[in-house]
Amino acid sequence: MRKLLLDTSVILHYMRGDSTFQKIEEEHKLLTDPSCIILISAISVGEIEGFFLRRGYGAKQTERWRKLLEKSITLSIDGKDDKLMKAFAEIQAYSQNNHPSLNPGKSKTIGQNDLWIAATAYAVGATLLTKDSDFEHFSEVFFKVIKID
């Protein structure tokens, strides 16, 4: 089974039904490969709901979003999830170049939402599918990152 955590940037292309998402689907078979487990962070769900609120998405986008949620597993951010909390601490320390055991030189400013998405990928052992280069410094250190161009 392949576990793919979709970053908000990829979800937005799915919602638009544009050529970028068609390319993603052709290459990664998110919706057609039964061995693919689609994961979405609760952080991304909140970000998408914000897009709906600000941009007034229509019926097509709403239907695509509903279908994607039906085919995916939404992962919550729970303060009682010790594995996730430790993953967040490691990801944050690494991003700030303060990790006690990993090589320095990878310091990068990254938003809190993206830190939580990264920590979620790390905690569940998923590959992160994104269009955002902010995650690249985590690739192969904590989890695999597939950056869509």
Image (cartoon, rainbow, N blue to C red):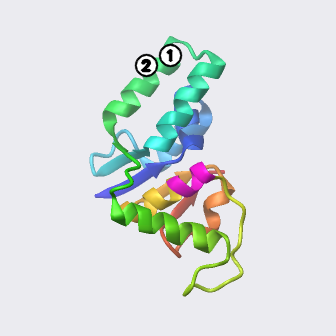
Specify few, some or many for label 2: CA neighbours under 10 Å numbering under 14, 14-19, or 20 or more: few
Out of 90 and 71, give the one closest to the viewer: 90
- Residue with the mark numbered 2: 63
The spot of residue 39 in percent (x, y) is 38, 47
- Residue with the mark numbered 1: 60
Out of 15 and 21, give the one closest to the viewer: 15
- Disc 2 marks which amino acid? Glu
Q: Is residue 122 above or below residue 23?
A: below
Secondary structure character of the magenta stretch overall? helix
- Disc 1 marks which amino acid? Lys
Toward the top, the furthest residue is 59
Q: Is residue 17 visible?
A: no
Judge whether residue 121 is colored magenta. no
For the point 37% across and 32% down, which residue is it? 69
- Left or right of 106? Residue 124 is left
For the point 54% across and 68% down, which residue is it? 91
Q: Are marks 1 and 2 in contact (CB under 8 Å)?
A: yes
Identify the magenta region. Answer: 112-116
Judge whether residue 115 is colored magenta. yes
Total marks shown come to: 2
Secondary structure type for disc 1: helix
Q: Quadrant of residue 122?
A: bottom left
Q: Is residue 111 visible?
A: yes
Q: Quadrant of residue 52?
A: top right
Give the label on residue 79, or none.
none
Between the C-alphas of marks 1 and 2, the distance is: 5 Å
Specify few, some or many for label 1: CA neighbours under 10 Å numbering under 14, 14-19, or 20 or more: few
